[in-house]
Amino acid sequence: MQIAIHLSDANLAAAVHSYVERRLRFALSRFGGRVGHVTVRMSANGPSSSRCRIEAELLPFGHVAVEEIDSDLFAAIDRATGRIGRLFSRKLERTREGRTGRESIRLAA
């Protein structure tokens, strides 16, 4: 898993970088080699709103993305990493279900 973190406020870079990486590894490590390149974009627009957008590559199926906005940057990071983990799980489950060879209702009739 390659992680690229982009933060608009350079003052928060050191503290936030390690926190984001730790949360992403916790959320996505169970998927192993299925996780490709992960891009995290964060912006802290004053005390009113902070934004965290995570885009991840799900190998070999495509990309998934989530975005969270909160007054606290760390809360936005927590919610976005949790959502990306659930989204990965859901996407993989749908792919597995598609491979089981379900019959069409039209063919059964």
Image (cartoon, grey):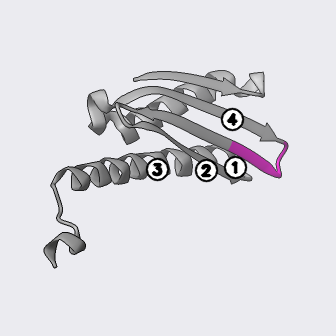
| Mark linked to residue 82 | 3
Three-letter code for the amino acid on which mark 2 is drawn: Ala
State the separation of the CA atoms marked 3 and 2.
Answer: 11 Å
Residue 78 against residue 56 in the figure, above or below: below
The picture quadrant where one finds residue 10 is: top right
Tell which circle, 1 or 4, labels the residue nearer the N-terminal end: 4
Three-letter code for the amino acid on which mark 3 is drawn: Gly
Residue behind mark 1:
72
Tell which circle, 4 or 2, labels the residue nearer the N-terminal end: 4
State the separation of the CA atoms marked 4 and 2.
Answer: 12 Å
* Drawn side of residue 39 relative to residue 29, left or right: right
| Mark linked to residue 75 | 2
Mark 4 residue crowding within 10 angstroms, few (<14) / some (14–19) / many (20+): many
Mark 2 residue crowding within 10 angstroms, few (<14) / some (14–19) / many (20+): some
Tag 1–tag 2 contact (CB < 8 Å): yes
Mark 4 vs mark 2: in front: 4
Residue beneath the point at 59% across and 32% down: 40
Where is residue 67? Give x, y as percent: 62, 47
Three-letter code for the amino acid on which mark 4 is drawn: Met
Residue beneath the point at 40% across and 52% down: 86
State the separation of the CA atoms marked 4 and 3.
Answer: 16 Å
How many marks are shown on the rendered structure?
Answer: 4
Residue behind mark 4:
42
Give the residues drawn in magenta, as a range.
Answer: 46-51
Mark 3 vs mark 1: in front: 3
* Drawn side of residue 25 relative to residue 94, left or right: right
Tag 4–tag 3 contact (CB < 8 Å): no
The picture quadrant where one finds residue 59 is: top left
The picture quadrant where one finds residue 39 is: top right
Q: Dot 2 lies on which element? A: helix
Tag 3–tag 2 contact (CB < 8 Å): no
Residue 10 against residue 28 in the figure, above or below: above
